[in-house]
Amino acid sequence: MSSISLKLGYKYLRSNKGGAFSFTTLLAVIGLSIGISSLIVVTSVMNGFEKELEDRILGVIPHSVISSDEPIDDYENLINQVKKDANILEASTYINTQGIISSSYDTRGVSLIGIDPLKEKNMSIIPDYMLVGDLNDLNENNTIIIGSLLAAQIGAYIGDEVNITTSDIRTTLIGSYPRSVNLEVVGIFELKTEIDQYLTLISHSTSQKIKNLKANQTTGIRLKTNNLFTADIITENIINNLGSNNLTYSSWKNTHGTLFEAIKFEKLLISLMLFLIIAVASILVLSTVVMTVKSKEREIGILLTLGASNKQIVLIFFTQGLIVTLIGIFVGILLGFLLIYNLNNFISVIENILDRNLLEAYFINYFPYYINFGQIFLICFFSFLISLISSLIPSLRAVRLNPVEILRHE
């Protein structure tokens, strides 16, 4: 009888006119497919944006920085001690100074970073995003590398001279005034993030002169860890092992942590909203089974009088909901992957129709995506679970029908 239940469950999916599916069944399949495909596409695109931000922003800013209230003496020895930790991929000197950059065209506030050009390739992604020039050009005296947006704002290019004024005070016989230095622009980078507007790079030796430090002194040690999200814990352990009370640390979570928390929260909210689409599709599945139960009351009465068990009756209509759910999920997955892999082609077509760039205000000019198969599995699992529950409720109602009452009115 169980095989008959499965056959009847499939039969009741079909249209009375002989079609593969009835209209209500088709609506349920389409609704479930759209919900699942939408959720797959949106989560994959948001994962892509999150990953791009991680690569572009966290690939530039320090994972963590060891610093002190006083200049750090004999920094080479400290770097060697830090690099003994297995969690540290690279360590280098780091001097961060806030200042004002001026040209003959305009003035802007900037973050002036003193780096070791030889180690920067292992520390950040900036060497891979140089539009013109090279980081090794910083080894020349009084040179600077700036971002593309900053270069456009102040009207500076390779070979131009800019003036840097910092908050450090210089005292002479004629009085005290902010330190100021003229630097030659030897390179321009472009990350296509807000970093391009304020980040400038100079050599560590130039920073020492601006900060009036000795040759063996620095203000910070920049660390690159093997695990970005535990950088603060790793750095704290290193400082504890060094046994120095003068050293403190800060990580990327202090400067950009809220940005990534906001992205995760936004992704969660959008996912919850899209799950409502799946909930609506599950209601369509429920409606399909309810309508089938209502239209097949006579057949249910006959089956019950022939000795069909409650389990067999439930299985008939549960099979109907199961088939709709499996087809909807399968089509949704196919449609989702089809949209993801051709997303930028679709966007290009829309841009050509609208004659405008949809991403001109963003830091990248394409829709990135990152497929997380674990997330897709959870999407399909919860969709399957919700739809099955929606199928089971009207299926259980079918066994409560009284065959005597049903057949008496026939």
Image (cartoon, rainbow, N blue to C red):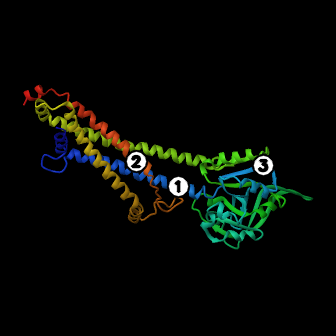
| Quarter of the rendering occupied by the C terminus | top left
The percent position of residue 112, horizontal first and vertical second, equals 72, 59
Give amino acid for label 1.
Lys
Q: Is residue 29 visible?
A: yes
Residue sitting at 91 percent across and 59 percent down? 174
Say which residue label 3 marks.
68
Closer to viewer: mark 3 or mark 2? 2
Q: Determine whether the residue tagged by mark 3 lies in a helix, strand or loop.
A: strand
Between discs 3 and 2, the one toward the N terminus = 3
Q: Quick one: label 2, few (<14), some, or many (20+) residues within 10 Å?
A: few
The Cα atoms of the two marked residues, 1 and 2, are separated by 20 Å
Q: Residue 398 lies in what quarter of the image? A: top left
Residue 181 rendering spot, x and y as whole percentages = 79, 64
Q: Which residue is mark 2?
A: 377
**In the displayed structure, would residue 410 be above or below residue 78?**
above
The image shows residue 23 at horizontal and vertical percentages of 20, 47
Q: Is residue 297 left or right of residue 249?
A: left
For the residues marked 1 and 3, what is the alpha-carbon distance in whole angstroms? Answer: 32 Å
